[in-house]
Image (cartoon, rainbow, N blue to C red):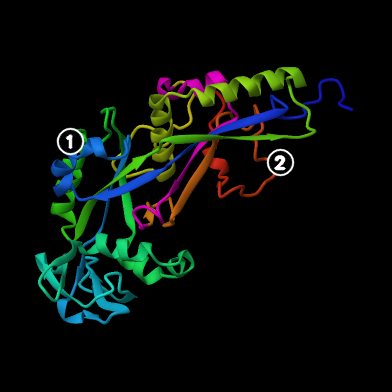
Amino acid sequence: MALDGEDLGPSFKYTLESALIVNCGFAGLVSPADLESLSKQADGLPRCQIYAIAHRPRVTVSKGSFSCDLDRMSMVYQSDWGDGEPATVQVELPNIFQELVSLEVEAGGSSLRFVREDGETRLEGPAGVLLGEFLRGLDPRERSDAEAVDGNLLDLKVCYVGQSGDPNGAAQRRLLSHNKLQQILADVNRRKPYLEVWVVLMAFDSHSSMTTFGPWASEMGWEESIHHWTESERTAHELEDTRRTNLVEAALIRYFQPEYNVMFVDSFPDDRHATYEFAYEVDYNAVGFELETLSTISCRLWTDVAEPTFIHSRLFPLHAAEDRLFLLDPIAQDLSGIVIKPQDRPARGH
């Protein structure tokens, strides 16, 4: 029993505490050089409201390293890290063509074309993109062990995250005259010409709720908690795409802290920001996102603060630690891949 005046510290506000999680259902990888042609097909693509601009060392293949039989293909990939010592990885893969093919290389080995004996082209494209396509068919357990391939050849460093309000997403026209993309391309060309710039298009087209409850004391009673939970579920069901996009853009920027972003890098969540104020109006305990790239672009994303991995997810408490408990605090461990990082709590008054 508490003594008069005794401060018991923060508590839960509701007996049922809820979080809103925005999920990525599609991701695609495109070269800036292909954005114009892609824009003409945008109405046939998933609506990718969110995009990331990323880079990695240029990936090439030596034509003389290629060998092929009906079962397997083998070739040597190189990536230029700008230090005079390219990383070299021999990659052996199932022969997805199930017939004999030869390899033709262009653009110094960065563009590949696989050709049948009769001269018909079976597959062509950038070396790094095709490698990701080949690896996508592997057993995920095999891929998780392919550190040399991913770390040296395919990992993409995120340097900017943005959103598009175009009806058909960022591929429609947002990126065609994008000042930040042009700045990044110019900076890479001047400072690190061995890098290639890529655009990751993402469709965060769904969301889910996480609810936890227990025998703890809460500020509101059971009836009020049930009412709040019902209203939060209704809001989640009716959530507009624009609100979902605003929320996940801010969350991704806070999580990745890309070099070329300024807003949200160290100020999310914040109840003073109008673009996602609905989350505070609903009175969620936390908000977050889930992003998986193994089955889509088959590349790991990373930044200086986010380790390279195929699954990125984070749940952000909306309230200061001294004011209200975070719904994962009683568990004090990862839940469904969500990483708990105390420094992501907002300060009191934010």
The dot on residue 330 is: 2
* Count of numbered tags: 2
Q: Is 311 drawn above or below residue 327 in the view shown?
A: below
- SS for callout 2: loop
The answer to whether residue 128 is above or below residue 313 is below
- Give 280 or 94, whichever is nearer the viewer: 94
Estimate the x, y position of residue 34 in percent, counting from the top left. Answer: 16, 47
Task: Answer yes or no: is residue 283 visible.
Answer: no
Return the residue at label 1.
Answer: 179
User: Could you tell whether 61 is left or right of 3 in the image?
Assistant: left
Q: Which residues are magenta?
A: 273-299
- Three-letter amino acid code of the residue under disc 1: Asn
Q: Position of residue 302 (x, y in %)?
A: 38, 53
- Give the mark nearest the N terminus, 2 or 1: 1
User: Along the horizontal axis of the image, is 272 left or right of 165?
Assistant: right
Q: Tell me where residue 291 appears, x and y as whole percent.
A: 44, 46
Quadrant in which the N terminus appears: top right
**Left or right: 169 in relation to 137:** left
Q: Furthest residue to the front?
A: 118
Residue 334 location (% of width, % of height):
61, 49
Q: Residue at x 24, y 80 (%)?
A: 68
For label 1, the SS is: helix
Q: Along the horizontal axis of the image, is 242 left or right of 166?
A: right
Mark 2 neighbour density, 10 Å: few (under 14) some (14–19) many (20 or more): few
For the residues labelled 2 and 1, the Cα–Cα distance comes to 45 Å
Task: Say what amino acid the circle numbered 2 marks.
Answer: Pro
> Is mark 2 in CB contact (under 8 Å) with mark 1?
no
